[in-house]
Amino acid sequence: MTGSRWRAAIVSTLLALSPLATGQESPPPTSASSSGPGDGIPASESLKYAIEWRLIPAGSAQLAWTAVPRSAPGADELRLHLESTGLVSRLYRVDDDYTAALNQNLCAQNSFIMAHEGNRNKETRVTYDPQLHKAFYLEKDLNKNSTISHDVDIPPCVHDVLGALLVLRTLHLEPGKTVQIPISDGKKFVQVKVESQRREDLNTPLGVRKTIRYEVFLFDNVLYKRSGHLHIWLTDDNRRLPVQLQVRLQFTIGTVTLKLEKEEKL
């Protein structure tokens, strides 16, 4: 598999975490927490994942979440650091940083990606404007000193492709239930189907966990053109901790799996 295809598979897994909502707007935070999105999610946490491609160690992902107190100004923040290792780094080194700012209902305000991939260096910024109902996309190629821009119509509240994982964790979607949700990456706006499929006892680096498996239908010309399947396993408890994520693409790329190996409440 080429480096660019590996990167597409990894980033699809990490960033294609579609937002879940029962309508055009996200549910407000519950009364369970005054400084986070509610339920059992802490106000600040850090999750570290080991990435496997075809059962080969391929990299690591560090996802950190910080919520501001509801009485304080400012935006909640998500940060992701994605780094390739070993054989994959020799094929195509990836060193990416992603930051997203969310409002108190977890609606996207802006996102920023600094991507160092092989010989390429790019910055990508998306600004979500609820008054104009627009998302503005700006990509800068730092090597070529060129820019690409897009804008797309969005509803008043939409989620970016990373912050949406928090929204998923605030929902209680029992197996057999589905929802339609809005998502935008700044270039496209789509309604995405999410299905709660079944309960599973899952072996993880942190031990056996009782989980619910979800499928997020982002591929096959929804948000992404390529064919594939994205599954997310959340613990079947109040935390709904994302202990495993997996994307299965066509045979030439194969399966990429992220397994939670460390969690910290900051």
Image (cartoon, rainbow, N blue to C red):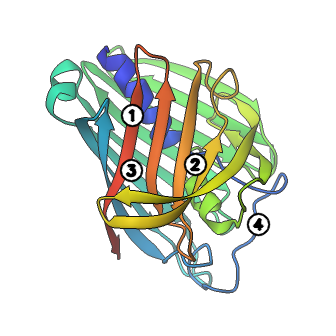
Q: Is residue 116 left or right of residue 71?
A: left
First in sequence: mark 3 vs mark 2: 3
Q: Quadrant of the C terminus?
A: bottom left
First in sequence: mark 1 vs mark 4: 4
- Could you tell me how far apart the alpha carbons at marks 1 and 4 are, in whole angstroms? 31 Å
Q: Quadrant of the N terminus?
A: top left
- Could you tell me how far apart the alpha carbons at marks 2 and 1 are, in whole angstroms? 27 Å
Circle 1 residue:
256
Q: Nearer the viewer, mark 2 or mark 1?
A: 1
First in sequence: mark 4 vs mark 3: 4
Q: Amino acid at mark 3?
A: Leu
- Indicate the secondary structure of the residue bearing disc 3: strand
Q: Residue furthest front?
A: 201
Q: Is residue 136 left or right of residue 177?
A: left
First in sequence: mark 4 vs mark 2: 4
Image mark for residue 110: 2
Circle 4 residue:
27
User: Eyeballing the image, is 232 above or below 169?
Assistant: above
First in sequence: mark 2 vs mark 1: 2
Q: Amino acid at mark 4?
A: Pro
Image mark for residue 135: none
Quarter of the figure with residue 134 = top right
The front one of 25 and 51 is 51
* Residue 177 image offset from top left, x and y in percent: 78, 54
- Indicate the secondary structure of the residue bearing disc 1: strand
Image mark for residue 80: 3
- Indicate the secondary structure of the residue bearing disc 4: loop
Q: Nearer the viewer, mark 1 or mark 4?
A: 1
